Image (cartoon, rainbow, N blue to C red):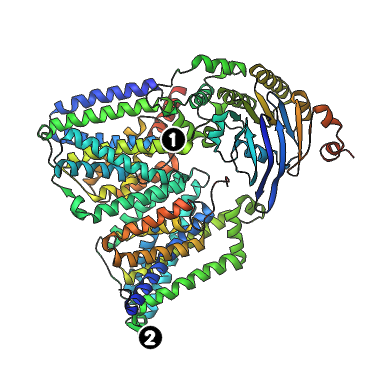
């Protein structure tokens, strides 16, 4: 199979496009963890809500190019607004409590969001078609390739670079990095910590929702889509290291390639491949490829 | 709660359970079997959560392994129950030893995530390994030994197994090992500097918790005459954590209360609406925000305020 | 060969040399103090010796056994017990249970899931608690005890392990003058009576000269002097750097 460069090319592209889709979700998860020290179980649920919101927005606008852009941005904005309310009213009360209570709170959100989604949109499966300008295939020289998958391949790195630029090159990014390192220091600088936390939670939720909206044209939209994507996102951040953006990027690439290549060469045992990879990485580096060890003993 | 009042509670509970089959309601008998199994499952997780202070989000995996293995040994290999059940529990414990060895290397949140990831691996294998597990459709049609085929007899069997398991866990919680478990929860560093190999003790606790979860899974598969992949799904693990938290982690009987209440609520609410998870989510939010010590904590507060007046 | 030997121990955190080529010995039965200004690296040195952190280079031996690569619980089993500068008890357990846990661990009973703990070792535990003057507080939760009493409890917990050497990090930190005086008398009596070697850090010079049989002075991660109290008292470097006298 390796002999055929065309098939190999398509597989590589598919891996990359899946990886970029996963990265957008994992990035939000790792961002929230990095600053708030909360592992957000509800991240998959935010992703799902994003897909449904895009579905509804497209229902109003019709399946046009503009509708697609509005759908993705609108999903992010609406989810962000809801996340703001949840964070301010409920989650913020748990910041000084045990980590486990925070974890369980986000698990409660999963249960609630899933049922609310079922109430609003029903339990059926929907599909969204790609916007007109991303339909069909484009010839990349070696082989024709679906435009939408190619679009994801390009959008992923752009988002990654945008987040990186924001974190490393802007004043806001500096504040977030400071919050990640030392929150006492942040207080001392006179920055409104509450605002930083809200901002990060909202941004992470919006990223997840946009990830869901972007994923909708290449997968089915149904009330079960959150449960598996959160596991993928967990594996990515465990491999890459919690809190590390670069780690999430690399982790997403590893998982994307393992999933696509695995499904071809290992058939149904592909799922085992990603776990074996995770176990190997954990044996060597328990804190992930780009994470920081949590113990001083070294 | 003091040891004495907890023992009194357990004794009273046991007496009530002895009487249930004589109340003449088959529905009540069957419901009680399930409540007992879920209580055992919650108690097993509390070895980790309440004693050692590790919150596993993958506990359902061992429940499922226990259940599937029992189903397989009974039906495919046609082993007698007395061999099938211990073998299933042993198998789950061996899995727990391997998975736990990796998981206890990581702390709190990482531990929760990693246990969750491994339970999903177990779930994935159950879904894919059709010849053994039945895949999506589940393992259906378990051949039960003759003496367990009547609901009455199954009730007595469940009561015996759950009672013995509960007694063993009680002894464990009051033993020298149990004291060290709690010491680790309270202050890991201090325990380490008393000469305790913390990772090793956490692993022992992990395996013991999995062992009793497998017993619960084994009972459940026999009760249902089958085992289904949903039993290993991560949200199922979440339900067990909720049972434990709802009851209260700092007492032995808390998880029994939590699991029983949660299951009875589920059965009741299911009669009115399909949105039980929504209700459970709201309950969990309330517990997390206002009742972090669970029902036991609430009772304690009420008790002290009544006494003051 | 000395009882405890620290040879060329160095610890780097990133580029920062926290402990730089530290070498000193503690003889059996000695009461050795590590003194030095804040930030000199006293706690880091303790953490190195007790295995909480690993030295970058150098060796540490107790009775000839290498400690540097060993884990804290293994070092405890060799015969070293320590306390922490910040009180470090099991807060929800009673004082009685705190000591009991230490005894269970030192007798390796943590592997027994059947042996009831309730009244186990009661006599021994009460004796230890009375020795640190906590006999009346045995049923109170450790977290609810006053700071000074928590420190005393820590001492009882450390002694329960029957250590050959006891490391006390700032044993009188946060204590009133009266508490400090009774506490140092207690510590001195106990280690003398039990023949335990003592290694401690202390900021209060009165305490140091009261208890210590030998002293090492740590400054910027380096040992600048080791000797008898009277030698240290008159050492020029020490006076200049540590006591701030020109």
Residue B167: percent from left, percent from top: 31, 26
- Residues A12 and C79: in front is C79
- Residues A245 and C146: in front is A245
Q: Is residue C212 left or right of residue C67?
A: right
Residue C23: percent from left, percent from top: 72, 39
- Label 1 CA crowd tier, 10 Å (few <14, some 14–19, many 20+): some
Q: SS class of the residue under badge 1?
A: helix
- Residues B129 and A124: in front is B129
Q: What residue does disc 1 label?
A: B201
The total number of labels drawn is 2
The answer to whether residue B260 of the structure is visible from this angle is: no
Q: Is residue A167 left or right of residue A125?
A: right
Residue C209: percent from left, percent from top: 78, 26
Q: Point out the image quarter for the N terminus of chain B.
A: top left
Query: Residue at image x 59%, y 54%?
Result: A181
Checking the image for residue A84, the label placed there is none
């Amino acid at each position: 199979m390796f002999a055929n460069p065309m098939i190999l090319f398509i597989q590589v592209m598919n891996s990359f496009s899946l990886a970029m889709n996963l990265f957008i979700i994992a990035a939000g998860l790792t961002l929230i963890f990095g600053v708030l020290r909360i592992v957000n179980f509800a991240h998959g649920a935010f992703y799902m809500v994003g897909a449904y919101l895009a579905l509804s927005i497209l229902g109003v606008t019709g399946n046009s190019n503009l509708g697609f852009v509005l759908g993705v941005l609108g999903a992010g904005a609406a989810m962000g607004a809801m996340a703001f309310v949840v964070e301010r009213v409920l989650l913020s009360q748990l910041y000084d409590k045990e980590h486990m209570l925070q974890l369980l709170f986000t698990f409660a959100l999963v249960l609630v969001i899933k049922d609310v989604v079922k109430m609003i949109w029903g339990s059926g499966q929907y599909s969204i078609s790609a916007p007109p300008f991303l339909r069909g295939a484009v010839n990349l020289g070696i082989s024709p390739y679906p435009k939408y998958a190619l679009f994801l391949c390009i959008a992923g790195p752009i988002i990654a670079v945008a987040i990186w630029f924001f974190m490393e090159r802007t004043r806001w990014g500096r504040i977030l990095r400071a919050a990640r390192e030392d929150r006492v220091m942040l207080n001392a600088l006179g920055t409104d910590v509450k605002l930083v936390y809200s901002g990060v939670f909202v941004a992470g939720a919006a990223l997840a929702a946009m990830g869901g909206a972007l994923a909708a044209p290449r997968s089915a939209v149904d009330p079960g889509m959150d449960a598996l994507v959160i596991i993928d996102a967990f594996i990515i951040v465990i491999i890459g290291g919690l809190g590390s953006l670069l780690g999430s990027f690399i982790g997403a690439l590893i998982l994307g390639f393992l999933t696509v290549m695995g499904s071809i060469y290992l058939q149904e045992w592909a799922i085992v491949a990603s776990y074996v990879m995770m176990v190997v990485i954990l044996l060597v580096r328990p804190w992930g490829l780009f994470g920081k060890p949590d113990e001083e003993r070294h | 709660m003091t040891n004495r009042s907890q023992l009194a509670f357990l004794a009273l509970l046991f007496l009530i359970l002895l009487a249930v089959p004589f109340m003449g309601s088959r529905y009540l008998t069957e419901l009680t079997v399930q409540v007992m199994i879920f209580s055992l499952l919650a108690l097993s997780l509390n070895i980790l959560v309440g004693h050692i202070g590790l919150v596993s989000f993958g506990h359902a995996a061992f429940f499922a392994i226990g259940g599937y293995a029992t189903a397989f040994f009974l039906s495919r290999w046609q082993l007698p129950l007395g061999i099938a059940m211990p073998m299933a529990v042993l198998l789950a414990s061996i899995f727990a030893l391997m998975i736990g060895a990796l998981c206890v290397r990581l702390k709190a949140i990482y531990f929760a995530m990693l246990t969750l990831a491994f339970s999903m691996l177990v779930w994935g294998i159950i879904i894919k390994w059709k010849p053994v597990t039945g895949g999506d459709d589940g393992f259906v049609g378990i051949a039960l030994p003759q003496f367990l085929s009547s609901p009455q007899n199954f009730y007595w069997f469940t009561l015996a197994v759950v009672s013995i398991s509960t007694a063993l866990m009680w002894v464990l919680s009051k033993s020298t090992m149990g004291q060290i478990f709690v010491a680790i929860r309270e202050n890991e560093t201090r325990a380490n500097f008393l000469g305790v190999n913390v990772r090793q003790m956490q692993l022992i606790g992990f395996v013991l918790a999995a062992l009793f979860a497998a017993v619960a899974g084994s009972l459940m598969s026999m009760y249902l005459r089958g085992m289904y992949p949903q039993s290993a799904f991560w949200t199922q693990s979440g339900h067990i954590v909720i049972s434990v938290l709802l009851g209260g982690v700092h007492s032995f009987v808390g998880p029994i209360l939590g699991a029983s209440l949660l299951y009875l609520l589920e059965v009741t609410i299911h009669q009115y609406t399909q949105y039980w998870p929504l209700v459970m989510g709201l309950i969990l939010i309330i517990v997390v925000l206002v009742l972090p010590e669970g029902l036991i904590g609430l009772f304690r507060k009420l008790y002290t305020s009544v006494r003051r007046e | 060969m000395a009882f405890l030997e620290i040879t060329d121990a160095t610890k780097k955190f990133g580029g920062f040399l926290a402990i730089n080529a530290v070498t000193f010995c503690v003889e059996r039965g000695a009461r050795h103090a590590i003194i030095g200004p804040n930030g000199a690296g006293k706690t880091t040195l303790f953490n190195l010796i007790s295995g909480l952190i690993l030295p970058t280079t150098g060796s540490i031996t107790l009775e000839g056994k290498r400690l540097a690569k060993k884990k804290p619980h293994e070092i405890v089993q060799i015969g070293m017990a320590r306390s922490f500068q910040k009180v470090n008890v099991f807060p929800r357990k009673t004082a009685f249970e705190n000591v009991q846990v230490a005894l269970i661990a030192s007798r390796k009973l943590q592997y027994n899931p059947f042996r009831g703990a309730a009244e186990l070792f009661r006599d021994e535990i009460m004796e230890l608690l009375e020795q640190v003057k906590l006999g009346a507080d045995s049923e109170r939760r450790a977290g609810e005890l006053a700071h000074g009493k928590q420190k005393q409890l820590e001492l009882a917990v450390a002694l329960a392990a029957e250590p050959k050497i006891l490391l006390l990090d700032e044993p009188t930190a946060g204590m009133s003058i009266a508490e400090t005086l009774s506490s140092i008398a207690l510590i001195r009596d106990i280690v003398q009576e039990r023949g335990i070697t003592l290694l401690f850090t202390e900021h209060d010079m009165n305490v140091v000269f009261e208890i210590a049989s030998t002293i090492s002075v740590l400054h910027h991660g380096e040992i600048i002097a080791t000797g008898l109290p009277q030698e240290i008292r008159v050492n020029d470097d020490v006076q200049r750097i540590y006591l701030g006298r020109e």
